[in-house]
Amino acid sequence: MSLFDHDSIFIYILSEHNNGKYNLEYFLNRVNVFHRDKGKCKICAIYLNPGNFHCHHIDPSKPLNEINKTVNLISLCNQCHKLVHSNQEPPFTERKMINKLTEYRNKLKI
C-alpha cells in the first residue's frame, strides 16, 4: 500500500482484516510521522519511499485512543521493521543502529 494511496486506505479501514488499530487517525498521522522523521528510517537512517516504508507502532499494546498518536509512531524501512519484530541478528554492525534496534524491540512489550 502506498504512503498516499487514498483508495487503498479507505478500503483497508473498512475491511475485515483491520482490527481497529489501523484507523483513519493512523493513516493521517503516518504522513506526519514520515515528515517529522525527515523521510528516514529511525534505525538505519536510509531515505524511505512508498515501497520501502513502514509506520511502526512503538507500543502496540496502548489503548485505541493512544495507539495512533504521533508519539507512538516511527518511520522504519521494511528491513528494520522486520528486525524489530524478530530476534534475528541485524546485518549492520554500527553500535548506534544496534542500540536503536534494541530500544525499539524492548518497547514492544509483547
Image (tube, rainbow, N blue to C red):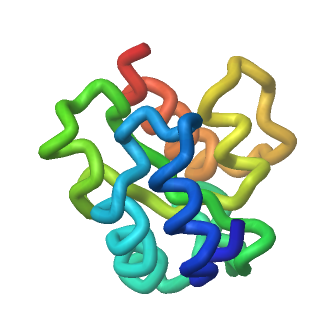
Judging depth in this view, the residue of 77 and 93 nearest the camera is 77
Q: Residue furthest top?
A: 110
Q: Residue at x 69, y 60 (%)?
A: 77
Residue 26 in the image, given as x and y percentages of width and height: 36, 60
Q: Residue furthest left?
A: 65
Label tally = 0
Q: Quadrant of residue 5?
A: bottom right
Residue 68 in the image, given as x and y percentages of width and height: 28, 52
Q: Quadrant of residue 25?
A: bottom left
Q: Residue at x 51, y 45 (%)?
A: 100
Q: Residue at x 69, y 48 (%)?
A: 80
Q: Is residue 33 above or below residue 84?
A: below
Q: Is residue 89 left or right of residue 105?
A: right
Q: Is residue 63 above or below residue 65?
A: above
Q: Quadrant of the C terminus?
A: top left
Q: Is residue 48 left or right of residue 29?
A: right
Q: Is residue 77 above or below residue 66?
A: below
Q: Residue at x 71, y 77 (%)?
A: 50
